[in-house]
Amino acid sequence: MTLVNDPDSKAREEIVRRDLGNVLHPIVPHKQLERRQLVAVAAENSTIVDADGAEYLDAMAGLWCVNIGYGRAELAAVAAEQMQALAYYPHTAMNVPAASLAEKINSLLGGDNHVYFVNSGSEANEAGFKIARQYMKQEHPGEFRYKTIGRYWAYHGTTLGTLAAGGMGERKSKFQPLGGNDFVHTARLTAIAARSASVTRPAGWPVRRIWRRRSSAKAPRRSPRSSSNRS
Ligand SMILES: Cc1ncc(COP(=O)(O)O)c(C=O)c1O
């Protein structure tokens, strides 16, 4: 593959218009993007081309996630082949490529591990926090070991848990409080449907089962049948 570098100012303007009108970018302030944009259009190996025709050495490899370089035709080919054979199946079941890749990664790590697949660095860190907590619960029942230590200025990702673990005040302050008691819960929809005379329950909804289970719960609850003030 030869890197194409064919700047087109009209095409650039069009991309910027479509982006600013439709895309929500992470971390970077949109006011800044309205003033100045880098519009990446092509890449090969470690070189990026932007819509103005400038070429850059991508020493960071994207966000450290294109470590084998851009334009790897052999990877595009195997990805296309796999997507035609089985593009996705939930990982509560097994599949061929996941088992094979996990075996390969595990063998590179010495063979005494298991591989947990995620889609991003943030999810990897979330998984790490959860695995550590679960391990502590199982190995130290009755104790409450859950704390994670992070460094000031450290960056660990964009999810609530990784923002909490990170030490970049400006990035996390807009989203605080992070975790803890800031999520509240209400009844699930099937239970709401059972309570409300104005909601038509779709055939097959397990309302009876829900109410039977709830009636054995500790908190006293009004029976949906005896309720006179349904809305
Ligand atoms: C050290 C570190 N942790 C976590 C992340 C988050 O990864 P992602 O953007 O894939 O969620 C990054 C991303 O730059 C990172 O550099």
Image (spheres, grey):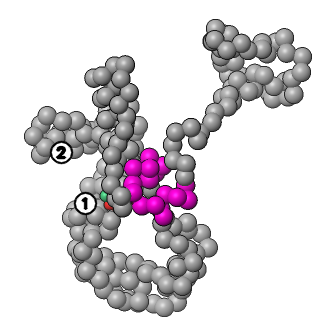
| Residue 121 visible within the image | no
Q: Which residues are magenta?
A: 159-175
Is residue 132 magenta-colored? no
Quadrant position of the N terminus in the picture:
bottom left
Mark 1 → mark 2, Cα distance in angstroms: 17 Å
Q: Quadrant of residue 183?
A: top right
- Name the magenta segment's main secondary structure: helix
Q: Residue at x 55, y 66 (%)?
A: 24
Count every numbered label the image shows and give the total: 2
Q: Residue at x 63, y 33 (%)?
A: 185
Q: Dot 1, how many residues are within 10 Å of its Cα: few (below 14), some (14-19), or many (20+)?
A: few
Location of residue 30 with respect to 49 vertically, above or below = above
Location of residue 121 with respect to 104 vertically, above or below = below
Q: Residue at x 75, y 21 (%)?
A: 194
| Residue 38 visible within the image | yes
Which dot marks residue 114? Answer: none
Q: Is residue 94 left or right of residue 221?
A: left
- Please tell me which residue lies in front, 141 or 108: 141
Q: Quadrant of residue 200?
A: top right
Q: Which residue is mark 1?
A: 75
Q: Amino acid at mark 2?
A: Ile
- Please tell me which residue lies in front, 150 or 213: 150
Which dot marks residue 105? Answer: 2
- Please tell me which residue lies in front, 92 or 217: 217
Classify mark 2: helix, strand or loop.
helix
